[in-house]
Image (spheres, coloured by chain):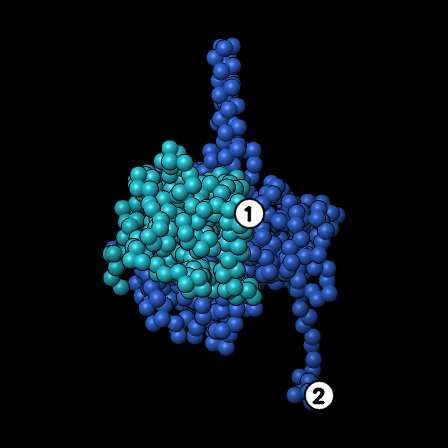
Chain colours: A cyan, B blue
């Protein structure tokens, strides 16, 4: 049998792998299979599997609406408060889920890491993809809410895919960082729930970022999720919402930097995963 | 023959921390030790005295050192050596799971490695789903898996259970399916760690047959096993690793022989093993005792040989059993005994934590004269890893036959004295046949 040279490789200590991106492309179906496994298993193991993806954001939204909308009576820019909250909850929950799932993904698949070769990037990315599926399911709730309130978006909704991509980039960047750090330093697993909980309140999920005083908005935008969430509101809620552009650009830069540094750090540490996990 | 794998100057270093068993650290430790060493350095600076740095807690361990290899295409190579000799590390580097510390490897062609049975299998998923998942993890495309699907199922013999979650599979079915997926990956190089030990003997034969077939197609096979019989049957040449270095390389028969004999040279009638806290159960000491309960190396065929096994349990393991094999120095197994052979006997898996001593008696007049090696293993088919403790050849002894007429000058693995009954020829034909 003639060797298939596209699969040949040379490994030299200390030199980075030349074929990494080629391999990643070759293993592209593994993204799908791992995500498919996680989704399949989730729905096989829990009776309310599918319902869970609906119930969790719905209940969170109810609490936020009651606390911020009804009790604190924060302004809603003329949009029904549930829709205002949900348009933000959608990217926020995607980010939070992706962050925690990706963070634990390498540890959860430690067996595979120590026994089989494949580009390690596949694992946290699949975790983000699984969260993305949940995000799409939650998206249906938003559609339901909009129909219920008779609230219809304008042309800006067409830009939504761009903001989805933006949210995905943010989730990937943060996910890669936490996944790699968590392998090396196991106490990062305690940081994950903290970031998720804390982030819900420091990001404009339960309220509109318009209530943040003007002089603080650029500072506020240092939280990259501010840009993501504002972008979602801008695209979904239409005319009434204004985007704070300087902050938004800052968010884009931060998110891109997060992703780039995440990939670099992940690539740097992934060679030692099998040894330390 | 063109080369399939070239390994130059390969070394792999592990740093063993003495503070804990885990190889990962916590961020807290890093910060704390950083602060500590900063403090110490400051103190050293002030007092002008030298103080150990934090690094001195760590020990460097070379799992592989300067390994050079040239493997030709179509070779079937056996990799042998004691536990900790570096076999798994070499396989892991060849499979690209971990990086070498120094050196270079080049391969020509696709590598399929089966270091563990069913990596990535999910117990909740069905056999069918797991074939696709496992195939993808091993690097097969969906189209490739689809085209091989029937062959895989057929080889594993699990047609009826395709849509049953694998958590309901027997361990035999599980390993059959897992091996089958890996064996059907179109690869030029197949790397198999000791995974076949789990299946039943019919399946083991089938797997060996498959690997032979793979070798005959001009594909390269690297096979690790503690079973010298399997190595001899499958492999044309053999590499013996010892403490991270190649000790001998060459024709299988020759290498296996010197590997097994090497054991006897250092052996005595007693061997003590260091504590390995990673093992849930292990052999602590083995002794060969004569009739006066003294440790001995030389016995005669008319004496019973008592094998005393001191075991240490750290965790209760379901299905744990012990294995003793008595072989000739060339590896030919003469006598094998499993602790679960005897029905109703006290099984090993229900012993409480702590130490236990077991005596296995080889009755007098069973083995023939000559030199023997004693192999020992603890295993469990129900545990995560089949091999619980595999020290391999643990001791050896020699037997003299003083009773039989020709004594040590005759052949034979057994020394039973068979009665020769004399019957009148006519009488015998009348009574029976």
Q: Are marks 2 and 1 on the same chain?
A: no
Q: Nearer the viewer, residue A35 or A256?
A: A256
Q: Which residue is mark 2?
A: B431
Q: Is residue B272 left or right of residue A77?
A: right
The numbered disc on residue A71 is 1
Find residue B383 and report its image quarter: bottom right
Q: Quadrant of the N terminus of chain A?
A: bottom left
**Residue extending furthest toward the top:** B47
Dot 2 lies on which element?
A: helix
Q: Is residue A152 left or right of residue A107?
A: left
Is residue B212 visible to us here? no
Q: Nearer the viewer, residue A26 or B152?
A: A26
Of discs 2 and 1, which sits in the foreground? 1
Residue B160 x, y percent position in the rendering: 50, 77
Residue A21 x, y percent position in the rendering: 29, 50
Parent chain of label 2: B
């Amino acid at each position: 049998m003639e060797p298939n040279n596209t699969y040949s490789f040379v490994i030299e200590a200390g030199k980075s792998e030349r074929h990494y991106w080629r391999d990643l492309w070759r293993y592209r179906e593994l993204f799908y299979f791992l995500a498919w496994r996680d989704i399949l298993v989730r729905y096989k193991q829990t009776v309310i599997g599918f319902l869970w993806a609906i119930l969790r954001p719905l209940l969170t939204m109810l609490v936020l609406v009651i606390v911020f909308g009804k009790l604190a009576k924060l302004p809603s820019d003329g949009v029904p408060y549930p829709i205002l909250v949900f348009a933000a909850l959608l990217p926020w929950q995607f980010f939070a889920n992706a962050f925690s799932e990706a963070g634990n993904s390498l540890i959860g698949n430690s067996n595979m890491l120590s026994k089989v070769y494949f580009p390690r990037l596949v694992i946290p990315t699949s975790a983000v993809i699984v969260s993305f599926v949940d995000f799409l399911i939650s998206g249906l709730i938003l559609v339901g809410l909009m129909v219920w309130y008779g609230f219809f978006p304008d042309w800006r909704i067409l830009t939504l895919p761009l903001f989805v991509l933006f949210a995905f980039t943010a989730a990937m960047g943060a996910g890669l960082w936490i996944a790699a750090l968590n392998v090396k330093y196991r106490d990062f697993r305690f940081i994950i729930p903290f970031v998720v909980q804390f982030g819900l309140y420091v990001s404009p999920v339960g309220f509109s970022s318009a209530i943040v005083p003007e002089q603080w908005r650029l500072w506020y935008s240092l939280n990259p999720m501010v840009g993501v969430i504002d972008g979602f509101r801008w695209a979904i809620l239409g005319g009434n919402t204004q985007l704070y552009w300087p902050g938004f650009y800052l968010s884009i830069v931060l998110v891109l930097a997060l992703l780039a540094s995440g990939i670099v750090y992940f690539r740097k540490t992934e060679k030692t995963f099998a040894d330390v996990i | 023959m063109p080369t399939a794998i070239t390994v130059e100057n390969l070394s792999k270093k592990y740093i063993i921390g003495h503070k804990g068993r885990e190889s990962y650290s916590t961020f807290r430790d890093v910060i704390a030790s950083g602060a500590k060493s900063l403090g110490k350095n400051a103190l050293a600076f002030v007092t002008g005295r030298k103080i150990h740095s934090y690094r001195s807690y760590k020990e460097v361990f070379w799992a592989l050192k300067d390994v050079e290899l040239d493997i030709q295409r179509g070779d079937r190579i056996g990799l042998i050596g004691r536990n900790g000799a570096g076999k798994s590390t070499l396989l892991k580097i060849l499979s690209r799971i971990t990086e070498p510390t120094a050196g270079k490897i080049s391969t020509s062609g696709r590598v399929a490695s089966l270091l563990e049975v069913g990596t990535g299998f999910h117990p909740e998923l069905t056999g069918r789903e797991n074939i696709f998942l496992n195939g993808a993890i091993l690097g097969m495309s969906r189209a490739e898996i689809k085209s091989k699907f029937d062959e895989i199922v057929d080889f594993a013999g699990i047609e009826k259970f395709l849509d049953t979650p694998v958590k309901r599979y027997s361990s035999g079915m599980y390993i059959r399916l897992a091996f089958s997926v890996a064996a059907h990956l179109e690869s030029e190089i197949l790397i198999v760690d000791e995974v076949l030990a789990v299946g039943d003997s019919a399946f083991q034969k089938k797997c060996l047959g498959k690997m032979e077939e793979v070798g005959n197609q001009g594909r390269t096979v690297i096979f690790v096993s503690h079973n010298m019989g399997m190595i001899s049957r499958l492999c044309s040449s053999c590499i013996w690793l010892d403490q991270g270095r190649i000790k001998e390389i060459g024709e299988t028969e020759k290498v296996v022989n010197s590997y097994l004999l090497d054991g006897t040279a250092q052996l005595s009638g007693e061997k003590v093993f260091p504590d390995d806290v990673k093992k849930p159960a292990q052999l602590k000491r083995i002794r060969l005792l004569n009739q006066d309960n003294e440790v001995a190396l030389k016995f005669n065929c008319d004496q019973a040989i008592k094998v005393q096994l001191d075991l240490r349990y750290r965790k209760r393991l379901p299905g744990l059993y012990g294995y003793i094999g008595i072989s000739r120095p060339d590896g030919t197994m003469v006598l094998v005994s499993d602790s679960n052979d005897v029905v109703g006997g006290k099984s090993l898996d229900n012993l409480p934590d702590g130490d236990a001593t077991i005596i296995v008696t080889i009755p007098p007049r069973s083995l023939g004269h000559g030199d023997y090696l004693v192999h020992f293993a603890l295993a469990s088919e129900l545990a995560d890893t089949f091999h619980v403790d595999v020290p391999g050849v643990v001791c050896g002894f020699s037997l003299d036959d003083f009773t039989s007429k020709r004594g040590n000058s005759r052949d034979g693995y057994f020394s039973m004295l068979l009665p020769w009954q004399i019957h009148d020829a006519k009488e015998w034909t009348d009574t029976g046949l």
